[in-house]
């Protein structure tokens, strides 16, 4: 079979790196589009500046849109809205318009879902969203105007190279530095964590699936904060301390439809990956 020609927009991310590695291992052609940072780029791949995006040829088989803006909590409202619009809405529109011959694969987020008690699935309703969730939903709407598309809604993604200010790295850092780990409330709040390698597999499988669709890129189960703390405790021998109250919503998912369509089931190796993350954090700190 002929090679596919792949373009990854937002190539300097740990998800883009995982997608690139898997595509290259399969013998496919890969190019990337970057903003400014270059610390996660792979050798022997052609990279283009974001400013040159519309100068690239319209001959790619698949275009992965990984680039996004995720709020960090310190912007004023006007600044936040502008950044969300440019990265999460305007860019997908531009990609669909320029790469009209390609299948567009969009890295979306489970933030597009409304809170609900039952397990979320691919058809669950989307409303009452944060500004970020709304921007990703508008980005999805832009992607749906493409003749060929796949949208993958991703839960909390982890792996080496992830943002160290997020939940799992912060817990690991506290355990390593203080030999103590705080568990908020009774630790019953649950979240879904998925390895970046599995997200990359979801994205590639969605790209190769014949039909257009929306897919749920989540792991097979959710973990409570207490369960995460206990896994970290196994590898660090830290103490656990219960503190405060945690009224945050728990999230559970059912993506059997996605697994069946894409013929892929995530590996659910969170405990093993936390051990790897601990070793990665030890090297960083």
Image: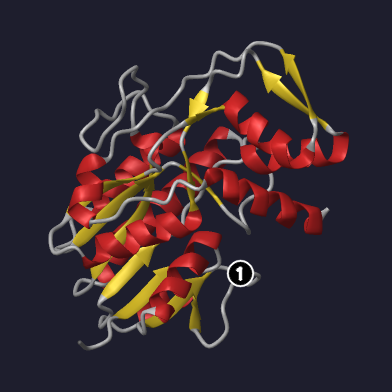
Query: Could you say where residue 16 lies in the image, as x and y percent from the top left?
Result: 48, 65
Asked whether 73 or 153 is in front, the reply is: 153
Q: Is residue 40 above or below residue 74?
A: below
Q: How is the image coloured?
A: secondary structure
Query: Could you say where residue 171 lies in the image, as x and y percent from the top left?
Result: 70, 36
Mark 1 secondary-structure assignment: loop
Q: Residue at x 20, y 34 (%)?
A: 123
Query: Could you say where residue 197 lies in the image, as x and y percent from the top left?
Result: 47, 59
Q: Residue at x 68, y 48 (%)?
A: 164
Q: Residue at x 16, y 56 (%)?
A: 212
Please indicate, yes or no, whether residue 215 appears anywhere in the rendered image. yes
Asked whether 226 or 43 is in front, the reply is: 226
Q: Residues within 10 Å of mark 1 (few under 14, many from 20)?
A: some
Please indicate, yes or no, whether residue 10 appears anywhere in the rendered image. no
**Residue ID for mark 1:** 40
Asked whether 263 or 47 is in front, the reply is: 263
Q: Is residue 142 above or below residue 253?
A: below
Q: Residue at x 25, y 83 (%)?
A: 59
- Specify the quadrant that holds the N terminus: bottom left
Q: Quadrant of residue 41?
A: bottom right
Q: Is residue 108 above or below residue 42?
A: above
- For this orientation, the residue located farthest to the right is 178
């Amino acid at each position: 079979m002929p090679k596919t020609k792949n373009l990854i927009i937002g190539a300097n991310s740990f998800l883009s790196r995982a997608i690139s590695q898997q595509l290259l291992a399969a013998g496919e052609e890969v190019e990337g589009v970057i903003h400014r940072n270059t610390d996660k780029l792979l050798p022997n791949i052609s990279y283009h500046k974001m400013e040159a995006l519309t100068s690239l040829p319209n001959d790619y088989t698949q275009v992965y849109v990984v680039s996004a803006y995720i709020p960090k909590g310190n912007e004023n409202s006007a600044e936040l809205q502008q950044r969300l619009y440019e990265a999460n809405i305007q860019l997908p529109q531009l990609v669909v318009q320029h790469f009209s011959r390609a299948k567009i694969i969009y890295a979306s987020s489970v933030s597009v879902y409304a809170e609900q008690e039952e397990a979320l699935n691919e058809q669950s309703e989307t409303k009452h969203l944060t500004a970020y969730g709304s921007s990703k939903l508008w980005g999805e709407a832009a992607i749906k105007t493409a003749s060929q598309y796949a949208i993958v809604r991703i839960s909390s993604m982890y792996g080496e190279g992830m943002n160290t200010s997020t939940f799992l790295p912060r817990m690991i850092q506290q355990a390593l530095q203080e030999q103590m780990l705080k568990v908020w409330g009774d630790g019953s709040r649950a979240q879904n964590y998925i390895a970046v390698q599995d997200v990359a597999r979801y994205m590639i499988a969605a790209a190769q699936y014949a039909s257009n669709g929306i897919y749920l890129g989540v792991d097979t189960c959710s973990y409570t904060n207490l369960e995460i703390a206990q896994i970290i405790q196994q590898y660090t021998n830290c103490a656990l301390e219960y503190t405060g109250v945690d009224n945050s919503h728990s999230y559970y998912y059912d993506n059997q439809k996605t697994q069946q369509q894409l013929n892929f089931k995530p590996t659910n190796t969170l405990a093993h990956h936390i051990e790897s993350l601990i070793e990665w954090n030890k090297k960083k700190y």
